[in-house]
Image (spheres, rainbow, N blue to C red):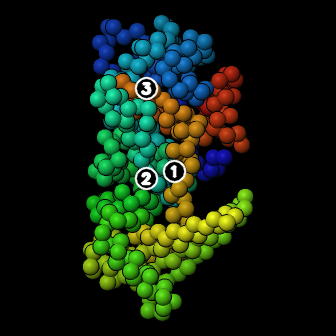
Amino acid sequence: MPNPSSPEVHPIEFLTHFSEISDSRQEVKVTYPLPEILLLTLCAVLSGANDWTAISIYGTKKLGFLKRFLPFADGTPSHDQLGNIFAALDAEAFQACFIDWMASLNKTVTGVVAIDGKTSRRSLDKAGGKAAIHMISAWSSEWNLTLAQRQVDGKSNEITAIPELLELLTLKGAIVTIDAMGCQREIAAKIISKEADYILALKGNQGSLRKDTELFMTEQAAVDYDDTTVTYHETVENSHGRIETRRVTVCTDIDWLKADHNWPGLKSIVMVQYHAILQDKTRAETRYYISSMTSDAEHQAKAIRDHWGIENGLHWVMDMVFRDDECRIRKGNAPANFTTIKHAASNMLRSVKGKHSLRLKRHIASWDDDFLAEIINT
């Protein structure tokens, strides 16, 4: 259910923010204006379409509905025409329009902004020698909305793309959370420069920083933290016979670590001890984070848990509701641009009040024109 404090999403405003996108087609040969194509694609995706053929059929069947909003004097394009048009649109410019649209709605971003990447597996084009597209997204855990996304060549290129994505966002007062791939000095410095805080996961890619953090926390735990100052927060959850315990320990007494590693904005280290029991099986894991905050363990524990909202709220939704991993759109910039449209559709569906799931809202929109009109006029 959408957060009641989330901003309203207006598709007509959505179209105005995409009005600056460059259309490479010769003006005299344009039969289907770009705003009409964007509205057609958006409405079709909102109604359950997941490929160009379905969108083309939707346009034929729902032409009367579409004419409520734009002329569509020459009808709607075929699936081949749709694919060609989206393949030619500049992907970075298209994503920039999306970010501009969301920025116009979200004047102040608060709470956790989770950064994470996802690969659209079926976008792999072996014949054309193109790898599957990988998109990094910024997700507002408070509003349950995608704030921005950026296409990168592969997961390894997230390191260079994340600062560029952060630069486009207004983050003052927010908490940016990123997995271990984003635990880089440049990224931490960028977050601090945006007047935001960070919690970054630590793994082996940080070498001695990870080892020093683990060694310190292990030694201090052995003497019950008598030599330092820490705060604790523990939760126990029992669901479907699975008992999960999370104990979060935050230490701000780390002048020695800051001196040794000179990490931008570093103010605390966080240890999360996870233990799960399911029947006769147990699982234990310890994770470490660095943070620019001096907040207590309860506050930082919540931020870490909120980070995983991007998995359920965005990645899972893209796969299970919008069938992202089954999408075979591969030509040119079309995979990235179509992903941006799906993110926009997801945001709009979330803006509609009510307890229905996104999947059910798509089903209803496919046959109830009034409901679809409500979505695109909300």
Quarter of the figure that contains the C terminus:
top right
Considering only order in the chain, which callout, 2 or 1, is on the residue closer to the N terminus? 2
Q: Sequence order check: which comes first, mark 3 or mark 2?
A: 2
**How far apart are the alpha carbons under marks 3 and 2?**
25 Å
Q: Position of residue 47 (x, y in %)?
A: 61, 26
Mark 2 lies on a secondary structure that is strand
Q: Can you see residue 130? A: yes
Q: Which residue is mark 3?
A: 329
**Residue where numbered disc 1 is placed:** 310
- The residue tagged with tag 3: helix, strand or loop? loop
Q: Count the marks.
A: 3
Tell me the kind of residue under disc 3: Ile
Q: Is label 1 in contact with label 3 (beta carbons under 8 Å)?
A: no
- As drawn, is 129 to the left or to the right of 373? left
The amino acid marked with disc number 1 is Ile
x and y, in percent, of residue 278 in the image = 67, 63
> What label sits on residue 115 in the rendered view?
2
Residue at image point 71% right, 43% down:
355
Relative to 132, residue 266 above or below: below
The answer to whether residue 15 is above or below residue 82 is below
Do callouts 1 and 2 mark residues in contact (Cβ within 8 Å)?
Answer: yes
x, y percent for residue 54: 54, 19
Q: CA distance from mark 1 to mark 2?
A: 8 Å
Q: Is residue 350 above or below residue 212?
A: above
Q: Residues within 10 Å of mark 2 (few under 14, many from 20)?
A: many
CA gap between label 1 and label 3 equals 24 Å
Give 376 or 263, whichever is nearer the viewer.
Answer: 263
Look at the numbered disc 1 and give the secondary structure of its residue: helix
- Whole-percent x and y of residue 216? 39, 82
Residue 333, quarter of the rendered image:
top left
